[in-house]
Amino acid sequence: MAVLTRRTIALAVLAVCCAAGRPDLPTGEASPSIVARAHWEIATSSPSAQAAFDRGLVMLYAFNAGEARAAFRSAERADARAVLPYVGEALAETIDINRPTTPEGERRAADALARGRPAAAAATPDDRALYAAAAARFDTARSQKQRFTAFFTMLQAFAQAHPSDGTASTLAAYAGYNATGVLTQGSADDLTADAQTIAADLDRALGVDPGDVGAHHLRIHFWEEAHRPERALADANVLAGLQYDPGESHLEHMAGHIYDRLGEYAQMVAVNESACANDAAYFGQGRDDAQDVMRGYHEHNVDFVLYGLTTLGLNAPARAFAAHETLYSREIVALREHDDRGVLALLGDAVTPLRVIAEARAGDLEAARKDLAGLPAHGGGTGESDLAAAAVARAAHDDAAALAAYRKALAAQGAFLGDPKAHWWAPPGEGLGATLLEARNAPEAERTFRVELSRYPNDPRLEFGLAEALAAQGKDDSAARNAYRGEWKGEKPLTLGDLG
């Protein structure tokens, strides 16, 4: 029942926020007849081996390594002479760009390839080439860099020799993404040579099969990292418009990355809420293979939902959603809506940056300063301790110290925007802009809010801050004010104290 309620919440949000209409974006409801699928023809006469392999492939693209392994093993049992199931089982340990190598995965992949060696010896030249590429990736005699590079080079050669094989191009692109350190260079963010190769691989794959969910998935990551998220809007719309079997939630979630970058928060909420419902169905099956990984991705989905709802001012739906999730989810929602007493009640005795921020806002500066002194400097490099220091200084009306701390927090983020916005529960950019206004430095506040809006478009909190900065200078604030009013769905208008 909770899942249905939560889905209703997000779709209701979507209906409210899309009342003005953005026809180029999906409504969040997928057609029940279009189900995410993947297919790669393998050398087998067994329909069950082919079906199991195809299930493994879509799970591979969904970064559900455990289910992918299980499916590929089923294919192996159905036809031990087919080579690609062993290759697929090995690829399950490296395709996830968030964790392309783990000690356990390296061992599992080597074992799968060892079991597949007899089949590879009797295989077709093409299957032997793919097996050899996987073997190079997991060759312990080479360094990690050499393995990743060899894998990319060999898969790339195979893909170029088989331009009508879209799956080969997709897998080559993933191999390239993991082997390549950076995608852009120079002030104009020109693509590196390897990045151009990856982009060409993905385009070729989608030219063969426009419904290739693996290519759409990676294309979102690619253009997001290359600072051109608008180029992946079509990919987001494709993934948002499909239905997914339990365990495939990460594919649907990926659409939210682009909606986030383009400031389409209602759409971001809807796809991630649906992904969370998929997770609930999957976890309800009681399967335990790699559930730890998928639970981590689930928390990522939850973060997107809560960020989107609270950005729009929909705090009650955010609280309702968080009530079914972790204690931390409830803590950060309470902090975002400045329910500082609620934050402290949830935290209990735990001393964290969240506690310091809540204590400072609640007016207990003595406790806030004491707890701040016990935090690691700069939050271990994340900037969270700087955010706590900023909250203490701001509550003490020490503008100079607050500004310095907010700037340190922003510097800790660097160019990283966060997935979603880094520290969305107490954003340093918002806090910096608001403190500048409190310090009567409206011109610098205006610049701050404009920079933040270039990073996080359509954010009503930032639009409100910009309007306040313009008004403080006697400038025309109508465009920013109207943008804020159009995006904000909160029960009460924002105030300067709500920012940061």
Image (cartoon, rainbow, N blue to C red):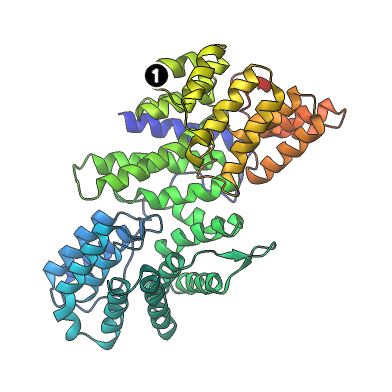
**Residue 9 appears in the picture as rendered:** yes
- Left/right placement of residue 136 relative to residue 6 reads left
Dot 1: element: helix
Quadrant position of the N terminus in the picture: top left
Any part of residue 464 in sight: no
**How many marks overall?**
1
The kind of residue tagged 1 is Leu
Q: Position of residue 340 (x, y in %)?
A: 51, 17
Position of 125 relative to 377 (above/below): below
The residue lying at 32 percent from left, 72 percent from top is 137
Quadrant of the rendering where the C terminus is positioned? top right
- Looking at the image, the residue that sits furthest to the right is 474
Measured as percent of width and height from the top left, residue 262 is found at: 60, 47
To which residue does mark 1 refer? Answer: 346
Q: Where is residue 51 in the image (x, y as percent from the top left)?
A: 22, 65
Task: Return the residue nearer the eye: 378 or 93.
Answer: 378
Quarter-wise, where is residue 99 in the image? bottom left
Q: How crowded is mark 1: few (under 14 residues within 10 Å), some or many (20 or more)?
A: some
Q: Position of residue 221 (x, y in %)?
A: 49, 57
| The image quarter in which residue 296 lies | top left
Give the residue drawn at x 67%, y 40%: 452
Residue pictured at 70% horizontal, 34% vertical? 463
Pick whichever, 35 or 340, lies toward us: 340
> What residue is shown at x 35% (from left), y 32% (from top)?
4
Q: 428 and 218: which one is in front? A: 428
In depth, the one of 282 and 417 nearer the eye is 417
Up the image or down, 265 lies above or below 202; here it is: above
